[in-house]
Each structure stands twice: as C-alpha cells, then as structure tokens.
C-alpha cells in the first residue's frame, strides 16, 4: 500500500475521505492548517486541543501547518508546499483531500500546492445528498462549528448535523455545505476508537458574516 497523509480539517468531508481511502492507502498522518495567533483550525475555528484529541482517537500523528493571520495566498502556498515536500521525503506518496465537486478548488490544490499525481480525491463527484446520509448512517456524529450567515441562520452554528437539520436546509444550500455554507467538527464515528468529548461555548460573529460556535473541551 502507498503511504498517504490526509488533509484534515476535523470536519465531515476529511473524515469521510479518510474512512474511504484507508481501504486503498496506508494512512500515516493528518495535516491540519492552524492559524498561529488563535491556535485554531483555519476557517473552522476549532480549538487545537480538539483536533489533537481527534488524532489521538484515530491513532495517527497530527502535523500542524501554522499560518499567520491574516494570511496571503503566497504565504499559504509556500507553507503548504513545504509541508507536502517534507512528507514526500518521509515516504508519503499521496495526499488525501475531501473535496466534492468544486473544480477550481481541486485545480488550485493540484496546480499550486501538490506535486503532480500526489492528490487523491476519494469523494469526488459523489451525490452530496446521498453522501451526507451515508455519513450519518455509518455512525458519524458532527456539530456545525461555523456557518455563513448569508446562507444559513447564525443560530445553526452549534447544532448537530442530523436529519432534522438537513430537513431545514434551504434548497440553495448544498447538503454537505460544499459551497462554504457551513463547516463541521466530527466527534464520533467508525474511524475513532472513542468519541471526542466537547461542549458548546458562545457564538461569535466574525467579519460581519461568519457565525462561529466555540467548541470547548
């Protein structure tokens, strides 16, 4: 089996990608982008300690790629290319990505971050309505850690990702939130040896648009 590392946000897509890819690749670690000043997962806003607990429950080493805030594309690309180059020198041949259908995002990864042929996209092109129900049927548990208030009510942040929530999503919202409508934190599922304990903190609006629910230990 080829050795692979997973681009790990701590959310449902990276969890599903890992779950699916482990049948074909030897998963040897997780790569997570962390905003240095806040010690939180970039975009998702999840505390470092919670992704560390995910990694422990997966039995995998967590590799943190620290970026500044604010961060330019040039700095981000430099940091990510350096990280993936280091992984390759350690025998990692593939990088597992959880992208679903955004061709520009996939192209950006393949052209600006990864070496040719290094990217693997195990969820690519799947029907997102079926995929989210596969996620729940498999026993995964997740909570919404960030929502775009231009797509969803800010009160959705902090809610569990379940059938009740899916039924309330507007038709314009992708069931998997692939257009950035929401981000999630996975706390249970078949890939973990035990659930990750967490509790809801306060909701905070950032940039007058993104509502975060602070997830606490």
Image (cartoon, rainbow, N blue to C red):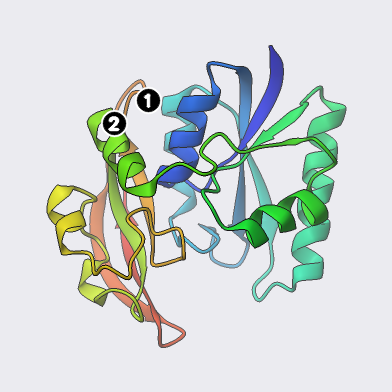
Drawn side of residue 72 relative to residue 50, left or right:
right
The residue nearer to you, when weighing 3 against 71, is: 3
Q: Secondary structure at mark 2?
A: loop
Question: What residue is shown with label 2?
Answer: 195
Cβ–Cβ below 8 Å for labels 2 and 1? Answer: yes
Q: Where does residue 36 sit, x and y in percent of width and height?
A: 63, 62
Above or below 169: residue 111 = above
Q: Secondary structure at mark 1?
A: loop
Q: Where does residue 178 sit, x and y in percent of width and height?
A: 45, 58
Numbered tag placed on residue 88 in the rendering: none
Please tell me in which quadrant of the rendered image residue 118 appears: top right
Drawn side of residue 80 relative to residue 170, left or right:
right
Q: Where does residue 198 sit, x and y in percent of width and height?
A: 27, 46
Q: Rate crowding at label 2 as few (under 14), some (14 to 19) or many (20 or more) other CA atoms within 10 Å.
A: some
Q: Residue at x 81, y 56 (%)?
A: 112
Above or below 161: residue 214 = below
Numbered label tally? 2
Q: Quadrant of the N terminus?
A: top right
Q: Is residue 88 visible?
A: yes
Residue furthest toward the top?
1
Q: Residue at x 74, y 62 (%)?
A: 76
The residue nearer to you, when weighing 22 against 86, is: 22
The residue nearer to you, when weighing 74 against 112, is: 112
The answer for how far apart the CA atoms under marks 2 and 1 are is 7 Å
Q: Is residue 196 visible?
A: no
Question: What residue is shown with label 1?
Answer: 192
Q: Rate crowding at label 1 as few (under 14), some (14 to 19) or many (20 or more) other CA atoms within 10 Å.
A: some
Please tell me in which quadrant of the rendered image residue 158 appears: bottom left
């Amino acid at each position: 089996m080829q050795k692979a590392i997973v681009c790990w946000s701590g959310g449902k897509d990276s969890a599903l990608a890992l779950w699916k890819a482990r049948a074909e690749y030897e998963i040897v670690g997780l790569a997570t982008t962390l905003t240095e000043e806040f010690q939180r997962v970039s975009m998702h806003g999840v505390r470092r300690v919670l992704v560390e607990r995910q990694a422990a429950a997966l039995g995998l080493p967590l590799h943190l790629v620290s970026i500044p805030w604010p961060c330019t594309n040039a700095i981000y690309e430099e940091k990510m290319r350096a990280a993936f180059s280091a992984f390759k020198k350690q025998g990692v041949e593939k990088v597992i990505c959880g992208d679903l259908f955004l061709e520009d995002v996939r192209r950006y990864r393949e052209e600006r971050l990864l070496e040719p042929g290094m990217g693997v996209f195990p969820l690519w092109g799947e029907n997102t309505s079926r995929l989210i129900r596969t996620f729940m049927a498999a026993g995964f548990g997740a909570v919404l850690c960030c929502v775009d208030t231009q797509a969803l009510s800010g009160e959705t942040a902090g809610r569990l990702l379940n059938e009740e929530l899916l039924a309330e999503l507007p038709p314009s919202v992708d069931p998997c939130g692939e257009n950035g409508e929401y981000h999630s934190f996975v706390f249970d599922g078949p890939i973990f040896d035990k659930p990750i304990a967490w509790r809801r903190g306060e909701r905070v609006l950032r940039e007058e648009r993104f509502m975060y629910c602070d997830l606490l230990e």
